[in-house]
Structure formats: structure tokens, C-alpha cells
Image (spheres, rainbow, N blue to C red):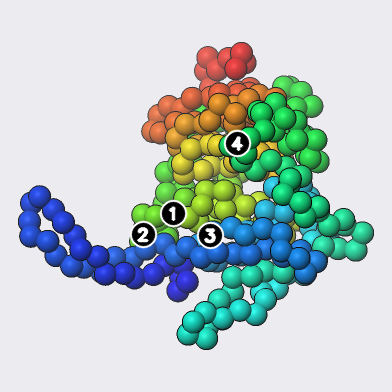
Amino acid sequence: MGRLMQRRRVLKLSLDGEPRRREDVLAAEEPLEIRLGGRSFSVTMRTPGDDFDLVAGFLVSEGVVWDAGQLGAMRFCAGEDEQGRQTYNVVEAQLAPGVALPETSLERHVYTSSSCGICGTASIDAVTKSSHFGLAGEQPGDLPELPLEILLSLPDRLREHQQVFERTGGVHAAGLFGFDGSLLCLREDVGRHNAVDKVVGWALREGRLPLRNTVLQVSGRASFELAQKAYLAGIPVLSAVSAPSSLAVELAQETGLTLAGFSRGRSLNVYAHPERIIASRVGNSV
């Protein structure tokens, strides 16, 4: 856990006592440069750890790869900080022979921000055209069923396994669960999108894509970007502790993704495609 957390001295102020200095544990945040074919492709701020999973998942989210055989070797490039220590903040990824390098222009294959100045319809269209694991073609009678009780239990199960959050209170988590509630993979990061990329990248490297019959449970809200990442990985259910954005709901409705929010305790809201969830009086009108 060495690079995941850092210790800092802080001044604690309170209305109930005198100021006092103490040591606090913070979640680490460092830049990661992703290179493809020797060229810089992207830079993201992340919590160090599971960096190869992060890179692999990011490439899935960008529509560059969707099968483990398309991604070749990954390695850390040399780099040192002011004290001469290896930073491990640059990852060079190689694509397999025959896999085309993405364009290096600012316009990505998939729009990764709902505030990029492009309208929602165009953003959704870009995502659906980049997908290799569509969900909308499934027939209701063929859908695996997810018990509501299991879906509601996932936020607590996610929280139980958040080791970095337990120490710092400063990271998001994404957990991949089976429809039976089994935990398949959990990743933490200062960026919620990075945590999801780490989960998807783990699945890619394990040869598990598409992620049928799984639930992606996230610790915060469900943005357009998280719905995009779930859909491109073939994940049929995205559940969030907090609210979804309007564009996330539109994308879920368009693509067949089951989207749930405000999953807390004994209730949740289903914003799109409730037909996968087993519960009395669950309708199919969303």
C-alpha cells in the first residue's frame, strides 16, 4: 500500500477544543501518461496501483481494443522524481499486429466527457457505434434475472472491501459482482472513472469481456462516462449509491443498460431497463 497513501501533518480545528496538530493519511494522487506506439495518447490523474489494468480499461473505454488478444505488452517507462526515485508514472502499451493505432487528434473515438461541447445525441451515437458488445438486442425472456435483494446488498459489500477508503476517506470504488452477489473485482482510485477503468482493464486482461451477467457497483454518482464504460465492456447493470446524470439515463435507455441510483439500504431508483431485476411490482415502463 506504499504508493497508495501518503502521510501529512495537519492542524485540526474544532469548536469543542483547542487546535491540535496530528498526522493524517491521504490517498495518493499522481499523473499517469499513457503511450501507444511510442506516442503520448493521454494523461490522467490517478491513485498509483493497478496501472496496467487502468491503461487496458482506458483503451476499452476509448474503443481502441475490446479483446485481450488485441493488447500486447505493457511496460513502465524510465522516469525519476527530484530524489532520483523511479516514478512509475508513464506506461507504454503496444497493440497487437494488425490493430490500428487510434488517431492522435483531440477528437477521440468515444466522447469521454459530457461537458465537451458536443450535444447529447452525438455523444450517445458515438458510444453506440464504438460498441462491440451490444445489450439492446437481448429479448426480455432471455435476460438473466437479478434479485433486488442482491442488488441492494452491493453498496455495503463494496464498502466492506474498500481498504484505501477505510484509511483515507478520499477515494472512489468500483466493484464488479456476479448476479449471485459474488465479488469478482474491486478497484479504488481518486477518480471514479479510473476505478471503473481498472475493473474493466482487469477483465480484459483476464479474457472475460464481454462482462455478461455482472453488475458494476460504484460508490458515487453515475455519470455519462461511467455508463459509457459499462456499456462498452458489455456490463448489463450499473448501480450507483448516488444519482445518475440525465445523459447517463439517456444513454442507458438507448443502449439497453439497466441503470439504478440512490441504492441505499432497502430501496433504489431504476432509471432504465428494470426488466432484469426480480422484485414484486417491478414494471417495465422505464
User: What is the crowding at mark 2: few (fewer than 14 residues within 10 Å), some, or many (at least 20)?
Assistant: some
Three-letter amino acid code at the position of disc 2: Thr
Distance CA(mark 1)–CA(mark 3): 10 Å
Q: Disc 1 vs disc 4: which is toward the camera?
A: 4
Q: Which of 44 and 209 is in front in this view?
A: 44
Q: Which of marks 3 and 4 is nearer the N terminus?
A: 3
User: Can you give x and y, in whole percent of width and height, for residue 24 in the image?
Assistant: 29, 65
Q: Mark 2 points at which residue?
A: 168
Q: Which of 213 and 260 is in front in this view?
A: 260
Please indicate whether residue 49 sits to the left or right of residue 119 in the image.
left
Is residue 238 placed above or below 9 in the rendered structure?
Answer: above
Q: Do the residues labelled 2 and 4 touch (CB within 8 Å)?
A: no
Distance CA(mark 3)–CA(mark 2): 15 Å
Three-letter amino acid code at the position of disc 3: Arg
User: Can you give x and y, in whole percent of width and height, for residue 117 in the image?
Assistant: 63, 35
Q: Quadrant of residue 131?
A: top right
Distance CA(mark 2)–CA(mark 4): 29 Å
